[in-house]
Image (cartoon, rainbow, N blue to C red):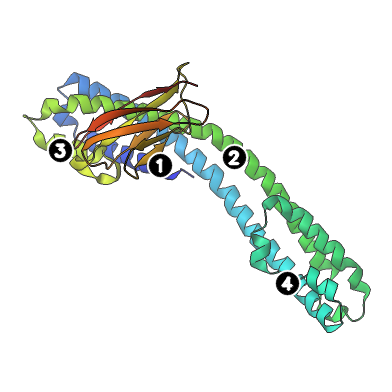
């Protein structure tokens, strides 16, 4: 599944790609812009190839694991309820306390604790099976075996989910790299689109509307860029904030950030990361522009 930011960018790129394909007659005669569009289209097609793999890989395993955990929690809660009723009826307060639980509480346990908890419940109840007072409560060897089987299967899905997360980490890096390339394409097209301001102002306006995040149109404004260390390597998890506002962003795995929907004006941009010296710069944000603003942090 795409992150919220990745999903927003993917929607934005798809919207712009459709606009540019339909508008080819408007810009085809201006070779630098047309070449940038071709590069954008190739990068977007690459992103389209990557995205389905991450979505399918994450969704199937997560859905299966969640459903099985619900079933396991339901089964355990049922035998615990019946056993607690038995314990209270026959004056066994310790057993009543041990089985005082419910489905929601069990479901919200850590995934890694489910196997050991299931085993402890089965081990607690198995000796009671021979008790003539307990038999009428309908807890059988088969019902306890079902709990053991489900907990084993759930534990197996935890392993698959961990493998999925590992695969997704690699895919996520590829997605962020593709997004970064597309940001570069848009930045270059932003520099060239004013070529059509006099000859085709409708195309220019349409370009700005379709290249903006969440369709904020020609009024979108802000900053974006990349944060690197002194060795030139991209830095993830760096915070970029506008002093005196609630606006802030955190860089992705490729060191890329974006702050949009910012009212035009002068702002002090503050950049900080754990283990590095903070830095700041005053920058003027213009109406209808996403400015490129890169940073370098020293440790």
Mark 1 vs mark 3, foreground winner is: 1
At mark 3, the secondary structure is helix
Q: Mark 2 points at which residue?
A: 165
> How dense is the environment of label 2, judged by Cα within 10 Å: few (below 14), some, or many (20 and up)?
some
Observer-nearest of 203 and 215: 215
Q: In this view, does 34 lie to the left or right of 228?
A: left
Q: Name the residue under label 3.
A: 205
| Mark toward the start of the polypeptide (3 vs 4) | 4
Q: Do the residues labelled 1 and 2 touch (CB within 8 Å)?
A: no
| Mark toward the start of the polypeptide (1 vs 2) | 1
Mark 1 vs mark 2, foreground winner is: 1
39, above or below 251, in the image: above
Mark 1 vs mark 4, foreground winner is: 1
At mark 4, the secondary structure is helix
Q: Quadrant of residue 141?
A: bottom right
| Mark toward the start of the polypeptide (3 vs 2) | 2
Q: Can residue 92 be seen in this view?
A: yes
Observer-nearest of 299 and 251: 299
> How dense is the environment of label 1, judged by Cα within 10 Å: few (below 14), some, or many (20 and up)?
few
Q: Mark 1 points at which residue?
A: 5
Q: Where is residue 145 in the image (x, y as percent from the top left)?
A: 81, 62
Q: How far apart are marks 4 and 2 (CA)?
A: 32 Å
Q: Is residue 247 left or right of residue 67?
A: left
Q: Distance between the residues labelled 1 and 4?
A: 41 Å
Q: In which quarter of the image is residue 161?
A: top right
Q: Position of residue 89 (x, y in %)?
A: 83, 83
Q: Residue 31 — which label?
A: none
């Amino acid at each position: 599944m795409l992150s919220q930011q990745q999903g927003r960018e993917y929607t934005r790129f798809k919207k712009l790609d459709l606009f540019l394909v339909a508008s080819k007659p408007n810009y085809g005669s201006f070779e630098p812009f047309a070449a940038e569009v071709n590069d954008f289209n190739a990068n977007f097609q690459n992103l389209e190839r990557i995205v389905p793999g991450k979505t399918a890989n994450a969704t199937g395993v997560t859905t299966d694991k969640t459903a099985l955990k619900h079933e396991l929690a339901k089964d355990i809660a049922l035998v615990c309820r019946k056993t607690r009723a038995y314990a209270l009826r026959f004056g066994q307060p310790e057993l009543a306390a041990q089985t005082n639980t419910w489905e929601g509480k069990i479901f919200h346990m850590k995934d890694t604790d489910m196997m050991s908890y299931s085993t402890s419940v089965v081990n607690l109840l198995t000796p009671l099976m021979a008790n003539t007072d307990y038999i009428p409560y309908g807890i059988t060897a088969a019902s306890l075996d079902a709990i053991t089987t489900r907990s084993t299967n759930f534990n197996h899905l935890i392993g698959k989910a961990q493998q999925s997360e590992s695969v997704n980490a690699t895919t996520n890096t590829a997605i962020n790299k593709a997004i970064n390339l597309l940001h570069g394409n848009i930045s270059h097209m932003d520099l060239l689109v004013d070529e059509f301001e006099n000859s085709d102002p409708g195309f220019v306006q349409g370009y700005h509307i379709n290249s903006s995040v969440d369709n904020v149109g020609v009024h979108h404004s802000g900053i974006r860029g990349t944060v690197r260390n002194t060795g030139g390597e991209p830095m993830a998890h760096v915070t970029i904030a506008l002093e005196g506002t609630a606006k802030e962003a955190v860089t992705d795995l490729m060191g890329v950030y974006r702050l949009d929907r910012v009212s035009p004006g002068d702002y002090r941009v503050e950049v900080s990361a754990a283990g590095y010296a903070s830095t700041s710069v005053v920058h003027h944000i213009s109406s209808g522009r996403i400015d490129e603003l890169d940073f370098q942090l020293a440790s």
